[in-house]
Amino acid sequence: MECRVLSIQSHVVRGYVGNKSATFPLQVLGFEVDSINSVQFSNHTGYAHWKGQVLTAEELNVLYEGIKLNKVNHYDYILTGYSRDTSFLEMVVDIIQELKKANPSLVYVCDPVMGDHGAMYVPENLLPVYRDKVVPLADILTPNQFEAELLTGRKINTQQDALEVMDLLHKMGPETVVLTSTDLPSKHGDQFLVALGSQKIVKPDGTNSSQKICMDIPKVDAVFVGTGDLFAAMLLAWTHHHPKDLKAACEKTVSVMHHVVKRTITYATEMAGPGKRPSPAQLELRMVQSKADIENPAIVVEAKVL
């Protein structure tokens, strides 16, 4: 049974971010990917220069209308990431609602990209749209700590706070929530980053419970772009293969990330030369070179069931 994903994300001519980060790995894992490019830029905005075009809400609607007129608007998954325009995001909401009517078992994977480390890098008026319209439609949500705090209005200082925030997010809609990164201290020391996940489970007797997991992920000393987009795409793929086992899905997702990032940093350091900091171009994810790891990742991070 083929699985079709509609991915609405950025596109870059060179490098890996948005749809460029998500499409190849999903295709390698056997998914059909239909992409709508919310922007088309020469490269990601971390370079010294970038040029390009932005898709408007109206243009998004025109593309969707074309798909609909040909009656090929049946999707198993929707994937969305960075958006910086409320009217565009509200059009995405309309499209998702319509696609969910057409296929009630459609799974919406949402990365609510708003900011990190206490600062928003999208306009603040996107928050109420995400909180009140987007998140209630999401089945799988992948915020970082700051985004989870914004969506729930709760600060995370302890692991218990994080678990409660994930439960609040479940109440808003998504049955799977993964906090992709937090500032919580790792038992393994400051070279590790803590990520947490929670999946709502309906027991045979009809009562609700949840599987909660925790992961300590080795930190890498470099700034990568496109890793969040790869994470959401891999979580989509591996939860598809392990629908009732968040632990396995997260282990595979994080392990893919680890292999891609490690290959990238090794290459970038070599290209930059001794004692030099790699450039944004040298730090583009080594995606094609990681094809084997994407298909069959060696598990390097174990998730603990809490």
Image (spheres, rainbow, N blue to C red):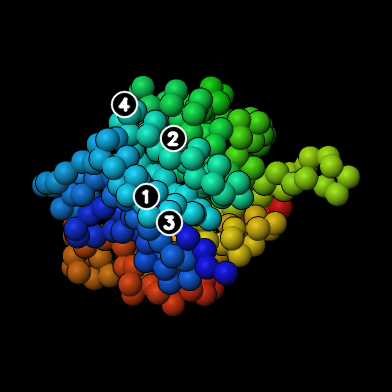
User: Under tag 2, what secondary structure?
Assistant: helix
Query: Is label 4 in a helix, a strand or a loop?
Result: loop
Question: CA separation, marks 4 and 3?
Answer: 34 Å
Which residue of the protein is positioned furthest toward the bottom in this rendering? 292
Residue occupied by mark 4: 123
Q: Of residues 300 and 141, which is closer to you in this image? A: 141
The answer to whether residue 37 of the structure is visible from this angle is yes
Q: Residue 234's x, y, as percent? A: 49, 59
Residue contact between numbered discs 1 and 4, judged by CB atoms under 8 Å = no
Question: Which of disc 3 and disc 4 is earlier in sequence?
Answer: 3
Q: CA distance from mark 2 to mark 3?
A: 17 Å
Q: Nearer the viewer, residue 279 or 2?
A: 2
- Calculate the distance from the C-alpha at mark 1 to the C-alpha at mark 2: 16 Å
Q: Position of residue 235 (x, y in %)?
A: 52, 56
Marks 3 and 1, how far apart in space?
8 Å
Residue 69 numbered tag: 1
The residue at the point 22 percent across, 54 percent down is 12
N-terminal label among 4 and 2:
2
Residue behind mark 2: 94
Mark in the foreground, 3 or 1: 1
**Residue 205 vertical placement versus 301 (above, below):** above
Q: Is residue 235 above or below residue 146?
A: below
Q: CA distance from mark 1 to mark 4?
A: 34 Å
Front label number (2 vs 3): 3
Amino acid under label 3?
Answer: Val
Residue 80 quadrant: top left
Q: Looking at the rendering, which quadrant does residue 55 occupy?
A: top left
- Res. 223 visible in picture: no
Question: As shown in the figure, which amino acid type bears the numbered disc 2?
Answer: Asp
Left-right relation of 57 to 253: left
Q: Which residue is mark 3?
A: 72
